[in-house]
Image (cartoon, helix red, strand yellow):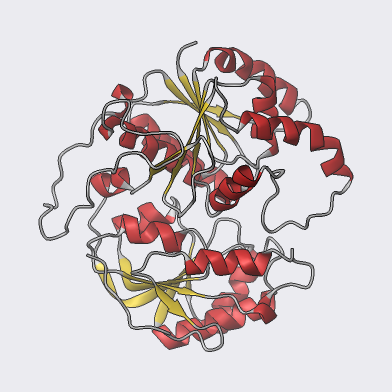
Amino acid sequence: MTGQLAFVESPVQLLNVLEWAHAAASAPEPGAAAPGGRSAALPALPSQRTRPRAQAPAPRPEAAAPGLTIVVLSPTDPMSRGQLRRMAQLARDEGFHVRWQEARGGRGALVRTLRDLAPLLRTADRVIVGDPFSRYVQLLLTLFGPRRLTVVDDGTATMEFAAQLARGERLVRWHRKGSRGPRELVLAPVTALARRRLAPTRRRTVEIFTSLPVDPPPGTTVTPHTFAWTRARFGPPRLTRGADLVGTSLVETGVVDAGRYTQAVADLARAHGATRYFAHRRESTEKLHRIAVETGLEIVRPDLPLEVIARRGPIGRTVVSFPSTVVHTLPLALHGTGVKVAVCEIAPEWLSEHVSPRAQGFLAGVAGTAAHEVDRLTAARATPAVERLEFG
């Protein structure tokens, strides 16, 4: 078996595959990482005062990832597709082969995708996935079990995946209720087999490449993700005087009430003097229109993942977010730039009545485990609860 195969379904997953390849190119010789713990530490984050604006090219990823093919299992929503196409071009510029697969393109798409990808899967020594909860990825893993498996970040779901893997639980997204509907019952055998394929064995190694705080499940290796490729390729950014808000899809996933969310955004904008709202790619047009009308914020639809957008700039001197992945990733991507990041907790009364009982605890954990440089904001007034700290 030769070659390495990555399956991505979102722009962030594709970005993190590039980050993984960059980290692998800079990694120490094999043997430095032991199963059940973190890999040897990556190089220290650079100082903005010492790193010149004109940077030396990053190591070519092909040296660390020979034969790596990135397969985009294309989603259907236009925003995700647009960002993915731009990220795919960045990957091609790095020398990778990117294969665009219309995996959800109507009748027969599933069978056609499996037929097209079967030869690649049979010869892949390593498979890299961004979303272990994806039904598509789970189905692919049930058909072909790789000897080496790497899971890269796809948001805070990585934390839940690591916890469920360690506890031996079935894989369920944190915002879904525990009850099983007809669809879940039909797919239960696939999910069960996929979970076994995502666990380490004597014949299979499992690596989690993450910027999030996770405890290594038994037998796995956790490799730190520091956004070294993003920092090497972009920036440093020009900083604006105002603040920027980061949107979330918590309303679209049914976790937070839409009215409560809009009011919280208005409170945050007023408290911090924000002028722009960076929309999540899954946020609905109707909700964004309401936010623009009721708050006066400029709605920005990023054409790349926010970590890249922020690194390229311009970006506000303060970035405020609800509990999401960016409270872990932006401090890394913006290290040394002087940008301040704050997280606003989700109050219990904001939650939808239909949300999973686990949601409040999970969101609190996301906010509570953010980098120590990140400010915590009280949900009641969306104002700073602690003294602000500056990166670098």
Seen at 49% across and 50% down, the residue is: 215
Q: How many marks?
A: 0
In the image, taking residue 354 as reference, residue 252 lies left or right, namely left
Say which quadrant the C terminus sits in.
bottom left
Which quadrant would residue 314 be assigned to in this image?
bottom left
Q: In the rendered view, would you say 114 is above or below 273?
A: above
Seen at 55% across and 56% down, the residue is: 281
Q: Is residue 295 visible?
A: yes
Q: Residue furthest right?
A: 182
> Horizontal and vertical percent for residue 81?
56, 43
Pick the front one: 227 or 293: 227
Which quadrant would residue 213 be assigned to in this image?
bottom left
Pick the front one: 284 or 252: 252
Seen at 57% across and 39% down, the residue is: 9
Q: Is residue 103 visible?
A: no
Q: In the rendered view, would you say 201 is above or below 386?
A: above
> Horizontal and vertical percent for residue 345?
54, 75
Seen at 76% across and 31% down, the residue is: 190
In the image, taking residue 104 as reference, residue 157 lies left or right, namely left
Pick the front one: 182 or 37: 37
> Horizontal and vertical percent for residue 247?
52, 67
